[in-house]
Image: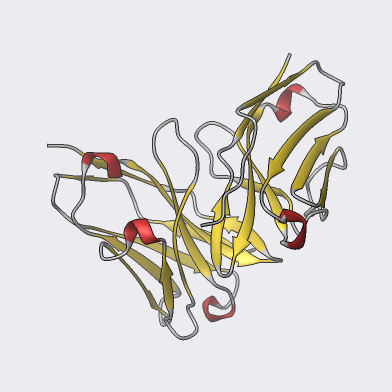
Amino acid sequence: SYELTQPPSVSVSPGQTATITCSGDKLGQRYASWYQQKPGQPPVVVIHQDTKRPSGIPERFSGFSSGNTATLTISGAQPMDEADYYCQAWDSSNVVFGGGTTLTVL
Amino acid sequence: QVQLVQSGAEVKKPGASVKLSCKASGYILTRNHMHWVRQAPGQGLEWMGIINPNDGGTGYAQKFQGRVIMTRDTSTSTVYMQLTGLRPEDTAVYYCARVAHQCLETWGQGTLVTVSS
């Protein structure tokens, strides 16, 4: 079965750039999405189809995917961006999630 | 606007079954696939399966094969997820999520299922 690997945690200072990676075999050939989840809330998509940002998501969120890695970048991370982030890809019609990355901004 | 409203929290004993609902509004149910995802306390997201509300077709994660049934009622714009043979490790928040733009674009608020004797 298809697997996605994320680092368990990433830490940045406010205003710095946070980069979260997601690795999977030939991931660049599949669409990747990224979800932000804050405690007690459902996930919210912040990037879909590798690079697209839904309406209402701040411009500081961006995505890129190539080869075996998809990347979520938060440029000028804010304390409000502290959350768990999950990457997701498709395996046929099945959903595959990465294990999640806890982003700390302080 | 598109909204998914899930049923309330459940407490079940081991071996019991639970049937959760997810009522869609703001769009036509049959136009988008729906997925179920669960999250155990302090853990990550775990995909359970998919239902195509248009024809009722389903696909389940291998882990849940034989224990999960996903159905829909187009007259009420509601999808259901039934999980049988509950175990304490099934304690989790269960989410429904609508597919759009090649992602799980809209999520329900989640339903906490607690399995305890």
Residue at horizontal 58 percent and vertical 69 percent from the top: A92
Residue B30 rendering spot, x and y as whole percentages:
53, 80
Residue nearest the observer in this picture, A78 or A4: A4
Q: How is the image coloured?
A: secondary structure
In the picture as drawn, the residue positioned furthest to the bottom comes out as: B55
- Number of labelled discs? 0
B18 left or right of B97?
A: left
B81 versus A40 height, above or below: below
Residue B114: image x %, image y %?
Answer: 26, 40
Q: Which residue does the image show at 68% across and 65% down from the upper left?
A: B102
Quarter of the image holding residue B112? top left
Q: Indicate whether A105 appears above or below B29.
A: above
Question: Residue shown at 78%/42% (left/top)?
Answer: A71
Tell me the quadrant of the picture where the C terminus of chain A can be found: top right
Q: Which of B42 and B98 is in front in this view?
A: B42
Q: In which quarter of the image is residue B65?
A: bottom left
Tell me where residue A80 appears, x and y as whole percent.
Answer: 72, 27
Q: Which of B59 and A104 is in front in this view?
A: B59
- Please state the horizontal and vertical placement of residue B64, each as a whole percent of the image: 33, 59
Of residues A72 and A14, the one nearer the viewer is: A72
